[in-house]
Amino acid sequence: MAPNTEREEPTVVDKQLDLGKLAREKGAYMVYPDYPPLVPFEHKDPGHLADPKKASLFDNATKIYDLTPHVGTVIQGLQLSTLTDQQKNDLALLAAERGVVFFEKQDINPYQVVEFGKYFGRLHLHNSVGHPPGLPELISIYYDIDLIPLGGDTIWWSGYEAYDRLSPAFQKFVDGLSAVHTGEHHQKLAKASGRPIRREFPPDTTHPVVRTHPVTGWKSLFVQPGFTKSIVGMSKHESDAVLKFLFNHIAGGYDFSVRYKWEEGSVGIWDNRCTLHCAIFDYFDQGRRHGYRVTPTAEKPFFDPNSKSRRQATKEALEAAQ
C-alpha cells in the first residue's frame, strides 16, 4: 500500500484550454484550494504489463535514440495523445529503465495530459503549489511567457548509476539504511512566496537510502538534499557526513546525468523512483518560463536485499544469453 497519495477529484473538462495563452494574458492564473488528507491505495504498475522488447514503441516511432549512456531517451514520430494502452505499458518500462524519456512536437492538451497521467498511477494533488482552475492535478511551473530564448534547462541524474558508482564496500554500507524525509522545504517555500498551505503536511517519513525498483528490480540511490534530512540510527555528526558525501556524489555525477533544453511542444516523462532532477534557474533576466506537469504516485519505497544493481543485472543477463 502506498501512503503518499490522496483522494481523486473529478476533472472539469475544457479541451480548448490553452495554458500558454492564459499565462501570457493573465500571468499568475493559479488557484490554491484546500485538499483532504492523504489516503492509501494499492498501486498496479503498468510497467509489469510491458513487452520487454517494447515493440509497440520501437516499431512505430520514426526515430528513438539515447541522449547519454545511462539516462535519457528521445522518441520521435509518436503523439502521447494517441498512444495505445500497450504503448503506455512499454513506455512505463522504458522510463523505468532509462530514467527519463522525451517526446517532441506534441499536440497533447492539458486535459489529455491529466487523463494520460492517470494511466500510470493515482495523480498527486500538491499541498502548496497552485494549479489552473478546474485542473487540480496539474502543477503549474512559473508563468509569464511560454518559452524563454535561453536557459531553463532541466538536469536528470540516474539513481541506478549513482549506486553503481559507489565502491562495493560503500554499497554494502548503504544497503538497508533508512533515512528521514521531510516536507519542510515546500512549507518554507510556500511561506516565503506568500502561498497558502493547501493540505496539512504529513509528519516526516522514513524511506530506504537504496530503493529497489519494482519493475526493473534494480537498486537506485534514493536521497536528495531537498527532502532527505537524516540517517536513521546515526548521530547528527555521522548522518550529516554520510548525507554530505552522497549529495556531493550525485551532484558531481556529470557522467551519469543528462541536461535537456526544452522546446515548444516538448514533453519529458521520468521515473522519480530511479532518477533525481533539478531545474536550472538561470533565466530570470530573460523572462520566466511556463510549463506544467502531472505526477502519478506509486508504491511505498522499499529495499529488497535480494535485488541487484543495474550493472550486475545487465552483466548476468548478457552472460546468460551467451
Image (cartoon, helix red, strand yellow):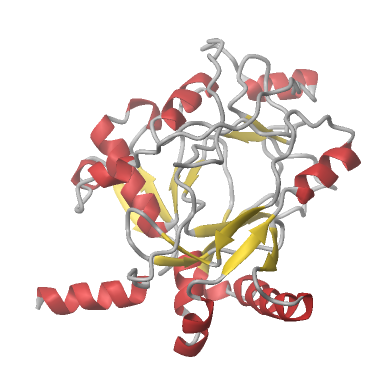
Query: Which residue corresponds to the image point at 53% horizontal and 14% vertical from the top-left?
Result: 10
Is 238 in front, or is 186?
238
Relative side of 183 to 309, left or right:
right
Q: How many marks?
A: 0
Relative side of 266 to 238, left or right:
left
The quadrant holding residue 26 is top right
Q: What is the residue that sits farthest to the front in this orientation? A: 233
Query: Which residue corresponds to the image point at 85% horizontal and 48% vertical from the top-left?
Result: 285
The quadrant holding residue 222 is bottom right
Q: What is the residue that sits farthest to the left in this orientation? A: 322
Question: Which quarter shows the N terminus?
Answer: top left
Residue 150: percent from left, percent from top:
71, 50
Residue 207: percent from left, percent from top:
56, 58
Query: Which residue corresponds to the image point at 62% horizontal and 77% vertical from the top-left?
Result: 249
Residue 307 visible, this orientation = yes
Residue 305: percent from left, percent from top:
38, 70
Query: Which residue corresponds to the image point at 51% horizontal and 73% vertical from the top-left?
Result: 162
Question: Which quarter shows the C terminus?
Answer: bottom left
Is 206 rendered above or below residue 285?
Answer: below
Relative side of 297 to 82, left or right:
right
Is 260 in front, or is 226?
226
Residue 62 visible, this orientation = no
Residue 201: percent from left, percent from top:
73, 39
Is 173 in front, or is 60?
173
